Image (cartoon, grey):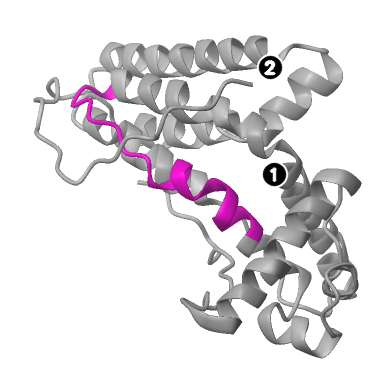
Amino acid sequence: MARLRHKLSEGPPVPERGARAQKHRLLLETAIALIQTAGHVPTVAEVAQRCGVSRATAYRYFPSRGALIVAVMDASLGPVRKFASRHPDGPSRVRDVFENTFPRFREYEAQMRAAVQLSLEHWAKERAGLLEEQPFKRGFRVRIMEDAIAPMAARLSPAHHVRLHQALTVIYGIETWVILKDIWGLSDRAVEKTALWMADALVNAALAESLASGTSTRPSKPRARRGTRRLPARKPT
């Protein structure tokens, strides 16, 4: 299975209760509101000013924009990242993940676009030797797609398994929304349908190529899954 070469960015610990928890929540909700209205990752100082908190206090909770956006993404995409399909069949599980979680990206589109913006900014500054904070690294989709295609391990060669894993992570993200909405002008529903079509096509192609090359072994047997969670129903938009 393919593995990332970098460690995913992690946010500071979240206070569980009391005044610290309330202050953390205020800063986080303010940051999300600013992202949704302004369309970019605000500085920690901007967030502090907006909610009437001193800069020193705000930096104790979020020492950098990277830490801030990690907290924003954890709060926004928590249910999506915890989703686990109950389907024992690989192709069905991939469809299940796309059908149940990909449409939810529209709810967090502003936050996800801001995360891409920050990662690109950090990439450019790091190359130029100008980055003064820990670089923001993304990649939670890798684990999500790893779980989705796990039942197909016996039906794919190692090379096809890795290629399918990598290809699906290209589709499963905000980048698909950016291209299909910004360039093609597609509606949200059309983006979802196109992404699902691409996912199906990749799965079918990987299975067919692996079978034709004679490197697949045997169909994976259905197996019971424990501890899976379903996402709550979405509110009408």
| Amino acid found under the numbered disc labelled 2 | Asp
Q: CA distance from mark 1 to mark 2?
A: 15 Å
Q: Residue at x 85, y 84 (%)?
A: 55
Q: Please, which residue is most extreme toward the bottom here?
A: 56
Name the secondary structure under disc 2.
helix
Residue 130, given in percent of the width and then of the height, sits at 90, 75
Q: What residue is shown with label 1?
A: 112
Residue 207 lies, with reference to residue 28, above or below; the image says above
Mark 1 lies on a secondary structure that is helix
First in sequence: mark 1 or mark 2?
A: 1
Q: Residue at x 82, y 73 (%)?
A: 44
Question: Range of the magenta residues?
Answer: 72-90
Q: Name which residue lies at 47% across and 41% down.
A: 80
State the residue at coordinates (34%, 11%).
208
Which residue, given by chain and number where applicable, does mark 2 sit on? 188
Residue 211 appears at what percent x and percent y?
A: 26, 14
Identify the disc placed on residue 5.
Answer: none
The image quarter in which residue 188 lies: top right
The number of callouts visible is 2
Indicate left or right for 77 with 59 as reference: left
Q: Is residue 224 magenta?
A: no
Look at the image and say whether residue 84 sits in the magenta stretch: yes
Residue 156 placement (x, y as % from top left): 27, 27
**Three-letter code, disc 1:** Met
